[in-house]
Image (cartoon, rainbow, N blue to C red):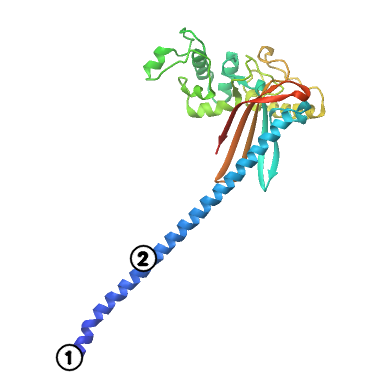
Amino acid sequence: MPSSRVVRARRPVAGVALVSVLWLLVLLSLIVLNLSAGSRTELQLAGNARLAASARHVAEAGVNWGAWSLLQANTAGWLADGSTRSLELDGIGVEVALFDEQGKIDLNEADPLLLVGLLESVGLDEKAALAQADAILDWRDEDDLLQPEGAEEKEYEAVGLLGPGNRPFERLEELREVLGMSEELYQQMLPALTLHSHKAEVNPMVAPREVLLALPGIHPESIDSYIEERRRNYASGERPPLLTGVDPRLLAPNAPGVNYSIVTDTAPNPDVKIRQQLLVRLQGGGRRQSFEVLQNSLRQ
């Protein structure tokens, strides 16, 4: 009888020990899984870092290719209107685009009609576009005279903002500070803008699609065919096509510019995306032609 009582007393202790062992095994399993997941994450991050470094080198190669093309006669048949070419190095592809800055809308010099046209092309109605264009004009002029729908110091103070600059824009990013400007609107306008054409008009022969859409009087459905034709004619040495229906006062003569942008985009995987943009000014001519780097930016 005594031995029987001893056995019954120990059974609960054995059960508790078994449960403790099971919980310990679960805890150890969780620790192992956590360590394994952490290791995989670290390996993935390290792999992405190596891939990003390779992608930066490929982007740089694309920039050099674009710069070399600008120094060739007729830019090696590559029209600088935003047209792209592809390059692949070490299994990583890169898209390279050339832009003649004369094809863009100069934020400091643009005719008000171009500003209104651009704002309407990205979705503003006529009234809102006129008001936003006037605010831009009030920012870039040096006086305190209020444009009909614009904004001077009093209008900025009313909403707790500093402004306007009352001077030319020094960076495109300053457009964000203009009264009424949203980040979404700024990003929509940005591809069409420059500070380096120094003209009130745009050169339609190198204007990117975003600029052509801003030209009052143009038929949007004809833009793609116009771009295709002018690129084809440029590569073959033929005369460029005529752009009809647009006020000629908004169009600059078709002459090569001196300021160009080279933009490269590479994305070897969804987690690694590299964009490099080089702004250059061509100098000299013939075999002595070279360029000066005005701006070099890298975004990843």
Where the N terminus falls, by quadrant?
A: bottom left
- On the picture, is 173 further left or further right than 201? left
Q: Residue at x 46, y 58 (%)?
A: 37
What residue sits right under mark 2 in the picture? 27
Q: CA distance from mark 1 to mark 2?
A: 39 Å
Q: Nearer the viewer, residue 298 or 254?
A: 298
Q: Amino acid at mark 2?
A: Leu
Helix, strand or loop at mark 2: helix
What residue sits right under mark 1 in the picture? 2
Q: Nearer the viewer, residue 98 or 230?
A: 98
Q: Position of residue 146 (x, y in %)?
A: 46, 9
Badge number at residue 142: none
Q: Position of residue 231 (x, y in %)?
A: 75, 29
Mark 1 or 2 closer to N-term? 1
Residue lying farthest to the bottom in this orientation: 1
Q: Amino acid at mark 1?
A: Pro
Occupied quadrant, residue 10: bottom left
Q: Residue at x 82, y 29 (%)?
A: 236
Helix, strand or loop at mark 1: helix
Q: Position of residue 57 (x, y in %)?
A: 63, 41
Label 1 crowd (10 A; few <14 / some 14-19 / many >=20): few
- On the picture, is 193 further left or further right than 33? right
Q: Nearer the viewer, residue 44 or 217?
A: 44
